[in-house]
Amino acid sequence: MRVLVTYASAGAGHRRVAEAIYAYLKESRGEVDAVLSDILPFTGKLFRFSYSAGYPFLINHAPWLWGFFFWLTGPSIFRRPVRALARMANYLGCMRFAAYLRRERFDFIISTHFLNSEIAAGLKSKGRISSRLITVITDFGVHPFWVSPGIDIYAVASEATREKLKEMGVADKQAMVSGIPCGAPFLKKADRGSLCSKLGIEQGKFTVLLMTGSFGFGPLGEIAEAVSEAAQVLVVCARNNRLLERMSKKKPVNIKAFGFVGNIEELMGASDIIITKPGGSSIAELLAMGLFPVFISAIPGQEQENVKVLSSCGVGYSCDNVRKVKDFVSRLRDNPAELERLRGNVLKISRPFACREICDAIR
């Protein structure tokens, strides 16, 4: 059996989810010939640039514009003409990917991006491929662009996500509440004492992990300095080299700064709570680790939808006011019973075995 796991490298989240599914298949399903593929190398330079550079530019420099596009393509009155134009542009831009799918004749195609799903579903609807199609929605909300005729299974984050799909006309039997997949390192029980020693931080001190994804944008420095008055802070600067350099020079008390890291699960395992952006894959990872999140710098659109869904489950404190963030951290530090209650909410909606549930659909 041949299975393609495919994503689009526009932001790191879609790739991380695809890599987690692919790794599970390779480790646990020996009878499966699994292939991992990014769609963008199959596209033209201009199309590829619009995805790989356009999205990061908008969310870093013009998030309001991204939010406007997200809103504009939601209501059906705007969605239909925009979607028709987008489908035409996507097909023209992804012709080599479409040819690849026709040529390789995969038994299953698992997609973690709506673009890949749309191309595969379009081919299947026209009888050009016969692959079973599984779309893994990588957020708790659902934008209509995720829905395409021809998709067999939608793997979704929560019951609320499935309800949103039903409102868009997707049959209940097509939606599987699996959770959003995350890598195996996030499923291991952490030995906090060993991790603290390895990371060079003080054991037994209330610890906060602060991160905003691979771009490291937002008021990280300001938040770190404010929260450090109440707790030990691990701040992941990621590709924000200017912030990392400033933190390294100042060497502030109670703050340990990191650059781009490959061991985020260890930082999570050494922390009591996390302050982060509400990206879908990041949420899946923190839920698997049992960390209660404080959300900052939410991107208009999908991340704001994530906050709404999680808030309805009693998970997440959303605030961009630095003083309120600090006060909330202080409150949890001084009230272990409340923190334990909030962790209970996290564990209720955590679905750490999403990879297994999705791959069990491959038969």
Image: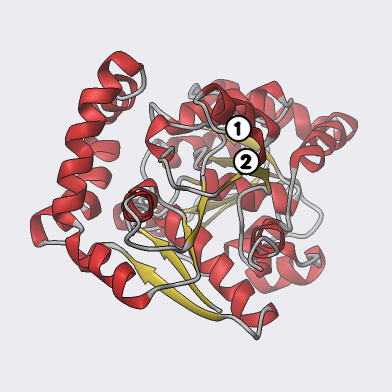
Q: Amino acid at mark 2?
A: Ala
Q: Percent x, y for residue 353?
A: 73, 58
Residue identified by numbered label 2 = 175
Furthest toward the right, the residue is 337
Residue in view at x 61 percent, y 75 percent: 25
Relative depth, front residue between 110 and 126:
126
> Quarter holding the C terminus?
bottom right
5 shown above or below 162:
below
The answer to whether residue 112 is left or right of residue 289 is left
Q: Is residue 89 above or below residue 239?
A: above
Tag of residue 161: 1
Q: Residue at x 40, y 54 (%)?
A: 214
Dividing the picture into quadrants, the one containing residue 323 is: top right
Percent from the top left, x then y, of residue 275?
58, 40
Reply above or below: 325 against 121. above
What residue is shown at x 78% (from left), y 60% (from top)? 203
Q: Which mark is residue 65?
A: none
Q: Residue furthest bottom?
A: 30
User: How far is disc 2 from disc 1 in space, using C-alphas?
Assistant: 9 Å
Query: CB of mark 2 within 8 Å of CB of mark 1?
Result: yes
What residue is shown at x 29% (from left), y 14% (from top)?
77
Most foreground residue, 103 or 11? 103
User: Can residue 9 be spotted in the picture?
Assistant: yes
Q: Quadrant of the N terminus?
A: bottom right
Task: Give the side of residue 82 with respect to residue 251, left or right.
Answer: left
Q: Nearer the viewer, residue 337 or 257?
A: 337
